[in-house]
Image (cartoon, rainbow, N blue to C red):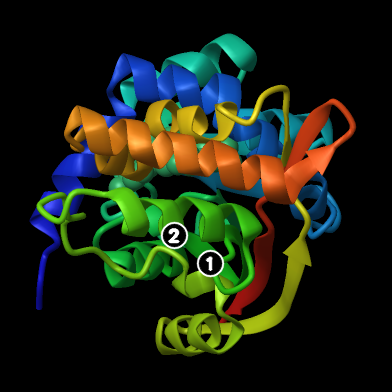
Amino acid sequence: MTTYEGFAELETKGWSDDTISSGYVSMFSEASDMAIPAIVSSIEGTQKILDLCCGQGNVTEALVKAGHSVTGADFSSKMLSYARERVPDGDFVEADAQDLPFENASFDSVVCSFGLMHVPDQTKALSEIRRVLKPRGQFIMTSWRGPDMSPVFQVFYSSVQEHGHPSVKMPDSPNFHQFADEEMAQSILNDAGFDVKKQEQVDCFWMLHSPEVLAEIFQNGAPRGGYLLSQQPEANNAAIKAVVAQKVRERFGDGDKWRAPIPACLIVACAR
Ligand SMILES: C[S@@+](CC[C@H](N)C(=O)[O-])C[C@H]1O[C@@H](n2cnc3c(N)ncnc32)[C@H](O)[C@@H]1O
């Protein structure tokens, strides 16, 4: 079995990098934040919740405001520093999703908002999630739709394919969009001991003030996008950015702004 070492290194470096972490918080998460109401409304009553891959604490903050008792966990001290600033009284723990420092059956629900696709050993992470959940506990996660359904990923991947240098390749990794494919997600979660209760689309988007911003969000706000763009020779980087901007102009125009749709998939599953 591959350990996806190159991918693990890319993710670890990315989330501890000043530019990527601050770019995610200031640019990328405008879209991620749009999934928060769907996550919060999937949780009934008042619960003890683990917000796994909590990043800057956006979901933790909303869950605390809804009255839950929440622990946020993330492996990046940089992302946790944003979370601690955002939720000063919050309970945050530096931890890897593949090796959680919590007792068995500690939480009523585990939430993982746009986190699991960044984890190299997802089987291990899911087994950790199931272990720390109480019997019949809920697992709620979100994931970005792939290019078959996502206009933003169509634009980004096709532009990299058309103008990227052939020597620039992403390290091997689990399929980034597999949890946004209903059947694939059901099969992985079933194998991990979960029954899927709900899968629904959440319509996230960016309202861009200029067509050039989309490539900037990927280069400076996401480890994989940052890698794919920053490893390019200058001419290829410039060509990709120009064609992304051109496609944004053609497809996403909305008055004096550009509405770039990046749909997500919300999954609610129950531990068997
Ligand atoms: C895309 S951000 C999501 C942040 C936040 N949950 C949101 O919805 O905006 C992914 C987060 O997962 C964290 N992460 C990635 N791999 C991880 C791992 N193996 N263990 C714990 N956290 C991880 C990153 O540090 C980052 O904060």
Left or right side of 124 for 136? right
Q: Residue at x 74, y 53 (%)?
A: 39
The kind of residue tagged 2 is Ser
Q: Which residue is mark 1?
A: 147
Above or below, 211 against 45 in this view is above
Q: Do the numbered discs 1 and 2 sit on residues whose CB atoms are within 8 Å?
A: yes
Q: Quadrant of the N terminus?
A: bottom left
Above or below, 209 against 103 in this view is above
In the rendering, at what x and y percent does residue 13 appear?
Answer: 21, 31
Tell how many labels.
Answer: 2
Q: Is residue 80 visible?
A: no
The kind of residue tagged 1 is Pro
In the rendering, at what x and y percent does residue 20 appear?
Answer: 37, 25
Q: Residue at x 41, y 81 (%)?
A: 192
Q: Residue at x 55, y 86 (%)?
A: 186
Seen from the viewer's position, the closer of residues 145 and 182 is 145
Q: Quadrant of residue 212 in the image? A: top right
Q: Which residue is mark 2?
A: 158
Seen from the viewer's position, the closer of residues 210 and 72 is 210
In the rendering, at what x and y percent does residue 11 appear?
Answer: 26, 42
Q: Quadrant of ligand 1?
A: top left
SS at mark 2? helix
Q: Residue at x 57, y 71 (%)?
A: 180
